[in-house]
Image: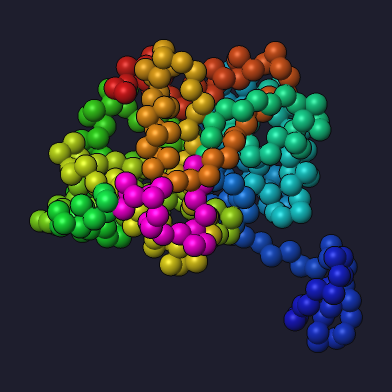
Amino acid sequence: MSILAIDAGLFLDLSTGCATPRHLLPVRRLATREQRVAEWGRNSVSPFTLGPGRCVVDLPNDGVAGVVVKGRTAVMATDPVARPGHEEQSLTALLDILKGRGLRPVFAAVTDPAPYLQRGFFSRPVAEDAMIDLTNFSLSGKRRSGIRHSVTSAGKAGLQVVPWSEELADGARLVSTAWLDTKRGGEMGFTLGRFDPERLSTLDCRLALDETGRVIGLGTWHPFDDGRGRVLDLMRRLPDAPNPTIDLLIAESLLDFARGGVALASLGSVPLSHGTVAERWYPTRSLWRYKAKFDPSWEMRHIVVSARPQMASALRAVVCAYCPEGVMAATRRNA
């Protein structure tokens, strides 16, 4: 059946000349949850809807949500992933399911809190997302001069960025192991990826090599918004890797995405700083300064809870979701 839209609610079957209401058209089904998340997830946190430690909730019209249960709290990374046009229906269904199970919902990082506020929920800013418009992206200009100089230095040092290959898997594993050795609390999780050699071949993984061909750094990216966006996940290097290694990995990835027609990239969210003590646990200020070198636009992300008095317990649940080895282990991480 050849279909042409003729107004907001009717489609014309070109083979018969008959108009068909939208709701009677056959629905295109996506085979896997991962495909649905990659196509329908509209913000940079959407790729983390699925992942280790989550209970997956299937919603009407192929919607999907990933829930980390901490006590009586259900923590979601962001909005449920929904078929376009069914966002409200999916959210309602998810909230009904959680209520039926006696769980309090927490959405850790949403772009637009309005649909939740309309339901009487409470939100507050929690992080800033470093977004880069790739439609005319380049390293030229004063604001990205530091990155441009790093890329030039990396080239003079013989560094290069290559796609993932099985032949380089052992080198990538050594990079991750060496990086983790500097983090006494181990890997975090939730909206921060974990090194999984079996998954790297299915991700957009890029490796930095030195002049001898040794793997000295790695980076992974996830797609969102039906391929129009990419979000940075893992970014690791050997302790003895040249200083420009990470700059080169990110810059070359962004330039490659721009050439390939990707419209938007996220360098990931940076939690809002909560003072010196909190900085010892997670160095948000230095992370913000690093990402600022790429001259992003900063978009606010909001945590959403069903009632304001629940915010303190919700934040504790979110922290626990990020720390699969336990909060005490995470507090021992090196800054």
Q: Is residue 158 above or below residue 320?
A: below
Residue 203 horizontal/vertical position (percent) = 40, 54
- The part of the image, by quadrant, that contains residue 83 is bottom right
Q: For the point 46% across and 27% down, which residue is it?
A: 322
Q: Quadrant of the C terminus?
A: top left
The range drawn in magenta is: 130-148
- Considering every residue shown, the one lying at the far bottom of the view is 15
Q: For the point 67% across and 16% down, which residue is it?
A: 310
Query: Is residue 309 visible from the viewing direction of this image?
Result: yes
Question: Residue 289 or 246: which is nearer the viewer?
Answer: 289
**Taking 174 as reference, is 57 left or right?**
right
Residue 70 in magenta stretch:
no
Question: Residue 28 or 82: which is nearer the viewer?
Answer: 82
Q: Is residue 119 above or below residue 210?
A: above
Q: Quadrant of the N terminus?
A: bottom right
Query: Is residue 209 visible from the viewing direction of this image?
Result: no
- Considering every residue shown, the one lying at the far front of the view is 142
Residue 140 in magenta stretch:
yes
Question: Residue 116 or 244: which is nearer the viewer?
Answer: 244
**Taking 135 as reference, is 239 left or right?**
left
Question: Residue 228 or 202: which is nearer the viewer?
Answer: 228
Residue 259 horizontal/vertical position (percent) = 43, 67
